């Protein structure tokens, strides 16, 4: 009969170390709090102190350090520098055991949690979750760990939904919050509402003035840099997008559009521009304005005009893209004559003068200014009559009764076609229709749908165009009323 001798295990399945060994396990602690509030900071300090003493008190453990993340959410591990450094050190053999308070402190994302733990196991690194009493080298704990990770993820989802609900409730109540650290011109007042910082507000007003005087957003940025004015984020450089955001942000006229973006993934904290997926709230006169609403509206109109012009726009002069050739319709541009002699001067002529052989004359800048002053004074001499004519135009444009009826009728047509398509698809799924007959009907309905939606889009675009024209006329009437009746010298702003 064969003799069988048992050879005892020499490796502890829990510690992965030899059963008889004097080698100490290299142990690290991990601490994290989700927010940067004072209360949570106290919790953070307590965790750091507790795990430092807890590990050092174990004679079989060697304390190699404590890794931590303060004020960072745990729904994913991408931005947790302390956590990522700890994992990197563990995989490099610097850590044998990681001790932390609970599964939820480690990660609130089931996939991240299990993936990280399994990767650590492959490198013989164990984790211990004190609250749940789970050692990850214990095979029986795998199911429990999965359940606890899932519960932590659901807890994170619940917290995220509660935060989102709270934000939307504040939006619905018209409560305005600004990212004050990176928002030029405002600070949080004692009452919690935005209050103006005058020194910064002057920079905002300068940006708006320079834009209306013809400068491009890039040109404005370069000018601010030359003055040594730092950007809202404290940088020496002004990006074009920063200037553009200041020029288009309604908060500078004292209003606030709330919920411009929303979270689409609570795990990745991914944000998306709100294009109608969730409600938005527009709060008028929510805080003191830095820019008058009228001036803000001028800027938006000028922004739209320049966008329509595309590359044709030049910010070299307030006259750029304002003078139009009567022969060919192209813009006048500035040209320098006799640039190297004492007869040097700047003239304006049609950019296509020699290609189109236009007969329009050239003008000096001074001649254009004189002509403008003359035309301005002729217009303002009959200002009241012009305003009355404009009001009649405005009344006609603001009457949207007929176009609204057409839009509603077209919407009904689109809905009817949609239902017909659904019914056809259902019929094809439930009965054996000849497929050539089905495809013919489907294609006919599809063409009808595309035609109907195109008409609807055209009607909606026409309505929007009329609203914009109505707004432009309102602004023009206000301009005529406030500007001087007689202009004696050139004024860039006018």
Image: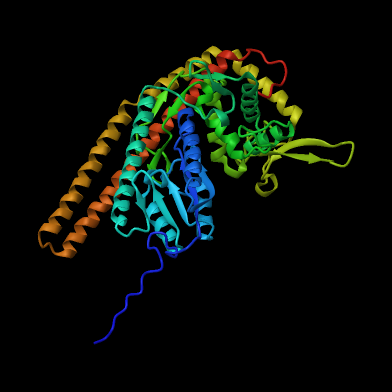
Q: Position of residue 17 (x, y in %)?
A: 44, 63
Task: Please state which of residues 286 and 27 is positioned toward the viewer in this rendering.
Answer: 27
Q: Please, which residue is most extreme toward the right here?
A: 342
Task: Please state which of residues 53 and 237 is positioned toward the viewer in this rendering.
Answer: 53
> Which residue is at a point 23% across and 55% down the rendered structure image?
444
Asked if residue 167 is positioned above or below residue 119 in the image, the reply reads above
Task: Please state which of residues 185 and 440 is positioned toward the viewer in this rendering.
Answer: 185
> Which residue is at a point 90% across and 36% down the rendered structure image?
342
> Which residue is at a point 44% across and 28% down the rendered structure image?
257
Q: Position of residue 480 (x, y in %)?
A: 56, 16
Q: Point out the image quarter for the N terminus.
A: bottom left
Q: Point out the image quarter for the C terminus.
A: top right
Q: Please, which residue is most extreme toward the bottom here?
A: 1
Quarter of the rendering containing residue 345: top right
Q: Is residue 325 visible?
A: no
Q: Position of residue 472 (x, y in %)?
A: 50, 25
> Which residue is at a point 53% across and 35% down the rendered structure image?
304
Asked if residue 246 is positioned above or below residue 6 in the image, the reply reads above
Task: Please state which of residues 63 and 375 is positioned toward the viewer in this rendering.
Answer: 63
């Amino acid at each position: 009969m064969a003799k069988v001798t048992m050879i005892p295990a020499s490796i502890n399945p829990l510690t992965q170390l030899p059963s008889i060994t004097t080698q100490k396990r290299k142990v690290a602690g991990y601490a994290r709090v989700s927010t940067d509030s004072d209360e949570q900071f106290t919790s953070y300090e307590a965790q750091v102190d507790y795990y430092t003493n807890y590990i050092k008190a174990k004679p079989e453990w060697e304390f190699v350090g404590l890794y931590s993340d303060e004020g960072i959410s745990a729904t994913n591990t991408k931005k947790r520098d302390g956590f990522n450094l700890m994992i990197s050190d563990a995989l490099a053999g610097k850590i044998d055991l990681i001790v932390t308070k609970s599964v939820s402190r480690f990660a609130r994302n089931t996939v991240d949690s299990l993936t990280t733990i399994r990767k650590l196991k492959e490198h013989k690194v164990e984790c211990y979750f004190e609250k749940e009493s789970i050692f990850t080298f214990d095979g029986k704990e795998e199911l429990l760990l999965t359940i606890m990770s899932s519960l932590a993820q659901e807890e994170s989802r619940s917290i995220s939904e509660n935060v989102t609900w709270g934000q939307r409730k504040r939006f619905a109540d018209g409560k305005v919050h600004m990212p004050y650290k990176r928002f030029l011109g405002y600070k949080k007042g004692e009452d919690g509402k935005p209050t103006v910082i005058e020194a910064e507000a002057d920079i905002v007003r300068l940006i708006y003035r320079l834009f209306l005087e013809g400068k491009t957003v890039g040109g404005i940025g370069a000018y601010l840099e030359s003055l040594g004015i730092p950007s809202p984020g404290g940088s020496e450089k002004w990006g074009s997008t920063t200037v553009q955001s200041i020029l288009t942000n309604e908060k500078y006229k004292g209003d606030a559009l709330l919920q411009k973006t929303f979270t689409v993934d609570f795990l990745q904290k991914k944000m998306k521009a709100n294009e109608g997926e969730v409600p938005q709230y527009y709060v008028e006169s929510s805080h003191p304005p830095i820019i008058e609403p009228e001036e803000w509206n001028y800027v938006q109109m000028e922004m739209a005009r320049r966008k329509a012009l595309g590359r044709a726009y030049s910010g070299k002069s307030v006259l750029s893209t304002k003078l139009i050739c009567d022969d060919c319709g192209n813009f006048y541009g500035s040209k320098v004559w006799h640039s190297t002699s004492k007869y040097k001067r700047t003239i304006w002529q049609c950019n296509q003068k020699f290609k189109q052989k236009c007969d329009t004359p050239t003008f000096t800048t001074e001649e254009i200014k004189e002509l403008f002053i003359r035309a301005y004074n002729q217009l303002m001499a009959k200002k009241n009559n012009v305003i009355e004519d404009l009001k009649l135009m405005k009344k006609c444009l603001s009457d949207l009764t007929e176009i609204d009826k057409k839009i509603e009728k077209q919407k009904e047509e689109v809905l009817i076609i949609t239902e017909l398509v659904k019914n056809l698809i259902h019929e094809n799924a439930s009965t054996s229709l000849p497929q050539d007959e089905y495809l013919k009907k489907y294609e006919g309905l599809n063409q009808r749908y595309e035609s109907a939606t195109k008409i609807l889009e055209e009607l909606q675009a026409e309505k929007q165009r009329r609203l914009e024209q109505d707004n432009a006329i309102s602004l023009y009437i206000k301009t005529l009323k406030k500007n001087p009746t007689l202009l004696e010298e050139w004024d860039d702003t006018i």
